[in-house]
Image (cartoon, rainbow, N blue to C red):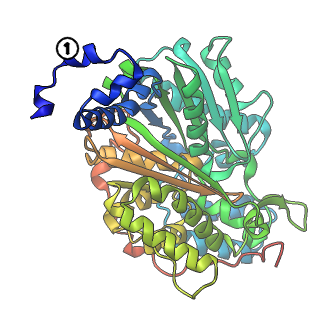
Amino acid sequence: MLLFNFTFNDLNDRLTSINDLKFIPFPLIFIIMIITTLLFPFILKLRNPKPSTYLVDFSCYKAKCSQKLPKELMIQRMRLYGYDYNEESINFSEKLLERSGLGPSTYAAEALLQEPPNACLEEARKEAEAVMFGAVDELLTKTGVKAGEIGIVVVNCSVFNPVPSLSAMIVNRYGLREDVLSYNLSGMGCTAGLAAIGLAKQLLKVHHNTYALVVSTENNTENVYWGNNRAMLVTNCVFRVGGAAILLSNRPSDRLLAKYELIHTVHTHTAGSDTSYNCIFQEEDSQGMKGITITKDLIAEACRAIEANLTTLGPLLLPISDQLLFAANYLIRKLHLAKIKPYIPNFRGCVDHFFPHVGGKPVLDDLQKNLKFSEYYMEPSRMTLYRFGNTSSSSIWYEMAYSEAKGRIKKGDRVWQIAFGSGFKCSSAIWRVIKTIDHHERHNPWSDEIDAFPVNMAIVNGSFPYFFEQSKNS
């Protein structure tokens, strides 16, 4: 009864010195301590709020119908214009295309479809402009954002790095303001798109009330391999034209307009290992032909990089029971205490949509097997590979667009994008869906053909012909 008879007037009268604290009943002190402990983090957050990063919208480039490259046409042009291709290389490419998971409507660079092909710097620049400007024009139309409102630009493209840079091309094309922050990421492979998202996120933390434009693309024109090294022919067969533009914002008012909120980004890098570093390597072959070597270690190193990424991502997503099992398994294997298989947590219970970089059919097969995702989860990635091919760092956005067009993205859903590439690097982004996405949206690369998907992938059978080079340290 003492607690209930104690009034605030009594408290005011008695707190005349620090020694008067002894007159406060213990239950009241205990309650005040609990309330203070609970409220302190919220008060601190209100005083130092972290700006949220919103994905206002994104756009994926869709090339002209005249750029479609059926498998038969590619083999025909290899015979007609591949002056240095021997019959063995052509047969290998044909076999690889049959089992690649690519469909008949992927897009090639216009320069490579000319008579004869014209793979020069000028044409490469034209390809970059067509893809980047096409995606950005559509994005600005969708969002209604003016170019002058953009304060940050991050562009990524691995193997085409002209002077001026691709980011400078964006600034010039749209007349962006003089204080715009402009970054150009190169040589970072297929994971560069999420690295660009991570960079933009960090910049938005310190530059308030602005927009960040991220453009992810790759260039095919100057990077076709014209020789007979099988390990270098793979890129010719799976990489295709594509690109995406993404508009991020830290403006509180944009929460009402944005589609997604960025929750986590995780980046891991395994280039400390020579095998990892060398498994995707740009170099010249014995005849002086430039290309990108993909070694036999690719799948194993991709799995190792993904495991490192999941080790960091797991605590952010998984329930404590799965975290403990994962940690115990990792330590047992790391310390060689016993020979056990890696423990794969159930990420299906943590996310509603899974968008991995498409890479190639064997990469997707391995991901599905190890992470135990159903065909429903894998459908966007397999259909993206089939319809658009490997568009490098932008492929994850074609997958997201696929699920939007299917009407699957609902308010409150969690989306997991994961990409991996040369280095070897792996990046993840976790998004929370702010609002249910209208699947009738016009500016979507799938909108005019989504009803034709999914296609039956059972027709793509047989093992992938991996006749790759030994890694450099073997």
Q: Nearer the viewer, residue 14 or 235?
A: 14
Number of numbered labels in the structure image: 1
Locate residue 472, reporting x and y percent.
83, 72
Image quarter where the C terminus lies is bottom right
State left or right for residue 338 relative to residue 438: right
Q: Nearer the viewer, residue 17 or 364?
A: 17
Q: Quadrant of residue 379?
A: bottom left
State left or right for residue 225 relative to residue 211: right
Q: Quadrant of residue 448?
A: top left
Q: Residue at x 53, y 19 (%)?
A: 208
Seen in the picture, residue 408 relative to 371 is either above or below; the reply is above
Q: Nearer the viewer, residue 224 or 270?
A: 270
Locate residue 292, reporting x and y percent.
75, 60
Q: Residue at x 80, y 30 (%)?
A: 163
Looking at the image, which residue sits at the far bottom? Answer: 339
Q: Which residue is mark 1?
A: 9
Seen in the picture, residue 351 relative to 62 is either above or below; the reply is below
Image quarter where the N terminus lies is top left
Q: Is residue 257 at all visible to an observer of this figure? A: no
Seen in the picture, residue 339 relative to 429 is either above or below; the reply is below
Q: Is residue 68 at all visible to an observer of this figure? A: yes
Q: Quadrant of residue 368?
A: bottom left
Locate residue 426, reporting x and y percent.
60, 56
Is disc 1 surrounded by few (<14), some (14 to 19) or many (20+) residues within 10 Å?
A: few
Amino acid type for the residue under numbered disc 1: Asn
Looking at the image, which residue sits at the far right? Answer: 287
State left or right for residue 360 relative to residue 113: left
Q: Residue at x 30, y 38 (%)?
A: 34
Q: Residue at x 52, y 14 (%)?
A: 149
Secondary element under disc 1, as helix, strand or loop, is: helix
Locate residue 226, reporting x and y percent.
78, 60
